[in-house]
Image: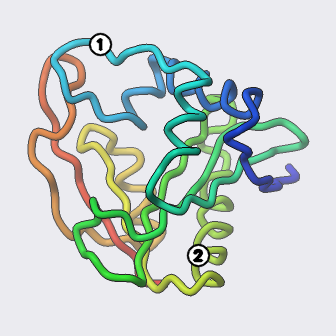
Amino acid sequence: MKIDFIPIDFTNMNDCAILAKWFNDPEISYLITPNFYQGPLGYVSPDYVSQLNVYTKYEKHAFFIVCDNYIIGDVNILDHPDFLLKKDNLSCWLGITIGEKAYQGLGVGKEAMRFIEKYAKDLGYERMELGVFEFNQKAIQFYKDLGYTQIGKIPRFTFYNGRWYDDIRFEKYL
């Protein structure tokens, strides 16, 4: 399997439509989007994806994960956003989604993590932080296996399947 990483253009509605598809997939959306209300997550349009990322106060470096010329996910970092638990000028926030279910569990995520960690280090970041909803045990184990350590949690952060769950925060020094 050949894996490539291509920059995402948030002004391109085709790129945003690919991302919106995953935000609207009920099997994936609750893993990547916090739900702050006791109801279903709302519809995410390509235009909303564009606006959210074009007009942001954080610098974002985002890439599609491409397997054998097919876009299957995305990986990104944000430049030291204010929601980091450890605030400094040398940390970034990590986001990753393997949106195409057929590609989950094949090692693509590990390759994407190697790519984005190197990319972040080359930009001068020394630390990455991320959040995982406590019900996503598969992702928690994935990050632990890659050397990420838990640094805290935000209680009752997201509503899923009839109850509130914590957001578990992890970090890794590059």
Q: Is residue 29 shown left or right of residue 19?
A: left
SS type, badge 2: helix
In 3D space, how far apart are the residues under numbered discs 2 and 1 (Cα atoms)? 34 Å
Q: Which residue is mark 1?
A: 40
Q: Is residue 36 shown left or right of residue 64?
A: left
Q: In the rendered structure, which amino acid carries the disc numbered 2?
A: Ala
Q: Is residue 9 above or below residue 42?
A: below
Q: Is residue 148 above or below residue 71?
A: below
**Sequence order check, earlier mark of 2 and 1:** 1
Task: Please provide percent x and percent y for residue 86.
Answer: 25, 75
Q: Which mark is residue 73?
A: none
Q: How is the image coloured?
A: rainbow
Q: Which residue is mark 2?
A: 120
Q: Is residue 116 shown left or right of residue 52?
A: right
145 vs 4, nearest the viewer: 4
Identified at 17% across, 64% down, the residue is 152
Task: Please provide percent x and percent y for residue 107.
Answer: 66, 53
Quarter of the image where one finds residue 51: top right
Q: Is residue 13 shown left or right of residue 77?
A: right
57 vs 105, nearest the viewer: 57
Q: Are marks 2 and 1 in contact (CB under 8 Å)?
A: no
Q: In the rendered structure, which amino acid carries the disc numbered 1?
A: Pro
21 vs 10, nearest the viewer: 10
All told, the count of numbered labels is 2
Task: Please provide percent x and percent y for residue 41.
Answer: 34, 18
